[in-house]
Amino acid sequence: MDNWRSVVSEEGRLIGDLLLERKAIYTGRNGKQVERIAVAGNEGETLRLIFKPLTCTETMGREAWFSAHVLPLLPMIRYPRLLGAADHNDPERYWMMFEDLGELEHSYSEATLTRAASVMPYWHLLPLDTVPESYEGHTPPVEQVWPMVAREREELARFLSRLGADGELLGALSAFIRERSAIPWDTELVVSHGDLYPLNVVLRDDELIVLDWEYIHRDSVYWDLYNLLDITSPTYRRPPVDGETRLAVLRTYAGQRERMGRPVRPDFMPQYHAYCAAYSAWILLLIGRDLAAGRYNPQELLRQGAETVRILAQMLHYLSA
């Protein structure tokens, strides 16, 4: 039943009389829309599919590669079955077609976060050469982020003051930058999902669905956890994760690693909090620049800034305690 192939033009666009319905799900980083579609099948049936054009040039072909080479190694997760993809490498026309798992209810619940942390070690502990070294994520590694934070600490302090940060937080941040600058970022390198924020994780009837593996690459053990728990964005809102929930999720991850015979390092907890503090500080610098440049909606940027300040304060409080 490959009727759906006729609804994709040579230009990688949806066309034709067999296309019955289409609904945008989200817009990618390049402005192209991922859509839920309905296609007329044989004998009056309706095929429900997900049409995904290339949303980032750098990741072309990576999800198809993941489906063929990595997904078979992860039987504990559910991922929409890839039905087909463009047979060329033109980024303007590239597309993929997936099965439609139906309307998915994205939850920020502790149960969803904990379940995701419990299966994360299964891909983290794959051999590093499972993923080509050339694959990169959408964000620089902490080794590149941190020098910017340390170099621009005064700009960061001014922006934090603008957001209402008190002297205690500013002092704690200054001490953290001073102390952390003398310690190398020696984090464990793992196979990383790369974009594991909660809208890419769904817990449905005790089945964990993990979406959008297009940024799979090698990264710090903390990157997926940071995306799951603490990363912020101007394009979506997430309920705050309190300190106890965060620690419970991190303990779940560490416990699963222990059961799999590859325990985390003894300083895993404080190192996660330091890693998160570094990225939170870096994101605050980016927010300040986006505000100055008039990018995004200023109210959403200020909302993101307030969320990030709260997370940074939690990290610094944990580290000081």
Image (cartoon, helix red, strand yellow):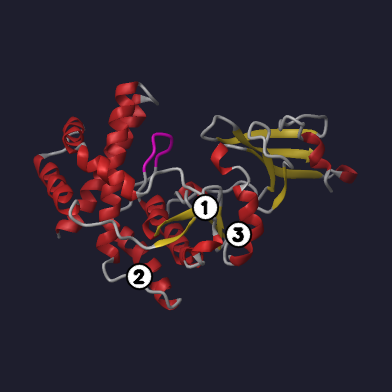
Q: Position of residue 42 (x, y in %)?
A: 88, 45
- Callout 2, which amino acid? Val
Q: Residue sitting at 32 percent across and 34 percent down?
A: 286
Q: Residue furthest right?
A: 43
Observer-side mark, 3 or 1, equals: 1
Residue 189 visible: yes
Describe residue 133's horizontal placement relative to residue 285 as left or right.
right
Read off the magenta span. 232-237
Is 80 placed above or below 305 here? below
Q: Quadrant of the C terminus?
A: bottom left
**Main secondary structure found in the magenta portion:** loop
- Callout 1, which amino acid? Ile
Q: Are marks 3 and 1 in contact (CB under 8 Å)?
A: no
Describe residue 199's horizontal placement relative to residue 45 as left or right.
left
Residue 40 visible: no
What residue sits right under mark 1 in the picture? 216
Q: Residue sitting at 46 percent across and 58 percent down?
A: 112
Q: Position of residue 101 (x, y in %)?
A: 65, 51
Q: Secondary structure at mark 2?
A: loop
Gap between marks 2 and 1, in whole Å?
21 Å
- Marks 2 and 1, the one that precedes in the sequence: 1
What residue sits right under mark 2 in the picture? 264
Q: From the viewer's side, name the closer residue of 294 and 140.
A: 140
Q: Position of residue 52 (x, y in %)?
A: 64, 40
Gap between marks 3 and 2, in whole Å?
26 Å
What residue sits right under mark 3 in the picture? 78
Q: From the viewer's side, name the closer residue of 197 and 30.
A: 30
Q: How many marks?
A: 3
In the image, residue 234 lies in the stretch drawn in magenta:
yes
Q: Position of residue 95 (x, y in %)?
A: 68, 39
